[in-house]
Image (cartoon, rainbow, N blue to C red):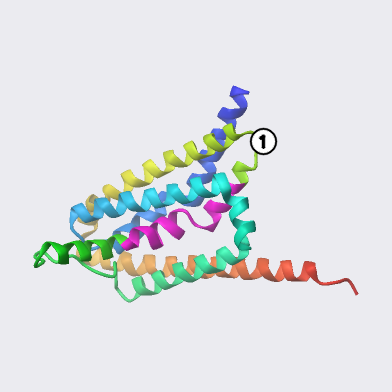
């Protein structure tokens, strides 16, 4: 039993790492938080990881119930996630990072709080979901949770917690990467990552559309 759990845990760890891919998410984090204050960047990193963890835990425990309750299919989730990711990629291609930047001096505590709250929104979408906890990660979580016994679900969640901690560490090390690249190279990286992110989004949409077409063909009555 213990050996099976260890093997399952290692499999879940490798699966989540490959799909969530904190390495590829870090340049996107850099681009989306470019120009933000260091404390805001740390908050964005923490909120993004916590959002992804919440999504994975939720779908690990009640994924099938949620899909059945709202009539959601994985193909529809991929299409919606693909649209969101594509829009973010397009904004990055235009040279934009986060929607709102925190200036060095903001008049009034309420104004500063509103601006920071607007910046933290990128932590929920697109960073937390669908970049870290995207359709692939959700499908993986639901698949791992399908194993008999709640203990396997807990091991799956623990594996994603490790990936979340690794992602957070990579995000907070982003300033060193920024200093290494420099302003000009960072702009190039931002636009390059925008192209990659947009391509990922289009790929997610195409996969969702293809799956939807296949599901439709299967439901057709035989001639």
- In the image, residue 99 sits, relative to residue 141, either above or below, namely below
**Which picture quadrant has residue 102?**
bottom left
Question: Of 23 and 123, which appears nearest the observer?
Answer: 123
Residue at (9%, 67%) from the top-left corner? 107
The residue at the point 56 percent across, 28 percent down is 6
Q: Residue at x 52, y 41 (%)?
A: 14
Q: Disc 1 marks which residue? A: 148
Task: Count how many numbered circles sit on residues in the image.
Answer: 1
The percent position of residue 93, horizontal first and vertical second, equals: 36, 73
| Dominant secondary structure (helix, strand or loop) of the stretch shown in magenta | helix
Q: Quadrant of the C terminus?
A: bottom right
Could one spot residue 130 in this view of the protein?
A: yes
Q: From this viewpoint, which residue is outermost toward the top?
A: 2
Image vertical order of residue 80 relative to residue 66, above or below: below
Query: What are the residue bounds of the magenta stretch?
Result: 121-142
Q: Secondary structure at mark 1?
A: loop
* x, y percent for residue 216: 74, 71
Nearer-the-camera pick, 44 or 34: 44
Answer yes or no: is residue 141 visible: no
Q: Is residue 124 magenta?
A: yes
Would you say residue 4 sits in the magenta stretch?
no
Quarter of the figure with the N terminus: top right
Count neighbours of disc 1 (C-alpha within 10 A) and say few if under 14, some if 14 to 19, many if 20 or more: few
Where is residue 61? Give x, y as percent: 56, 44
Q: Position of residue 138 (x, y in %)?
A: 54, 52
């Amino acid at each position: 039993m213990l050996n099976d759990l260890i093997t399952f845990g290692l499999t879940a760890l490798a699966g989540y790492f490959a799909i969530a891919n904190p390495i590829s998410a870090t340049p996107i984090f850099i681009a989306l938080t470019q120009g933000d204050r260091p404390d805001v960047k740390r908050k964005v990193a923490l909120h993004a990881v916590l959002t992804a963890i919440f999504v994975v835990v939720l779908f690990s425990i009640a994924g099938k119930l949620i899909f059945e309750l709202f009539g959601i299919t994985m193909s529809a989730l991929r299409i919606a996630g693909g649209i969101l990711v594509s829009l973010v990629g397009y904004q990055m291609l235009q040279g934009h990072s986060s929607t709102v930047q925190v200036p060095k001096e903001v008049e009034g505590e309420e104004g500063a709080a509103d601006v920071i709250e607007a910046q933290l929104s990128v932590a929920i979408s697109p960073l937390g979901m669908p970049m870290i906890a995207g359709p692939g990660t959700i499908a993986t979580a639901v698949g791992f949770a399908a194993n008999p016994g709640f203990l396997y679900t807990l091991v799956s969640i623990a594996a994603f917690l490790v990936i979340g901690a690794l992602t957070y560490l990579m995000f907070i090390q982003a300033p060193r990467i920024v200093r290494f690249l420099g302003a000009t190279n960072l702009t190039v990286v931002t636009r390059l990552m925008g192209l990659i992110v947009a391509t990922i989004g289009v790929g997610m949409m195409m996969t969702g559309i293809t799956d939807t077409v296949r599901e439709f063909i299967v439901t057709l009555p035989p001639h």
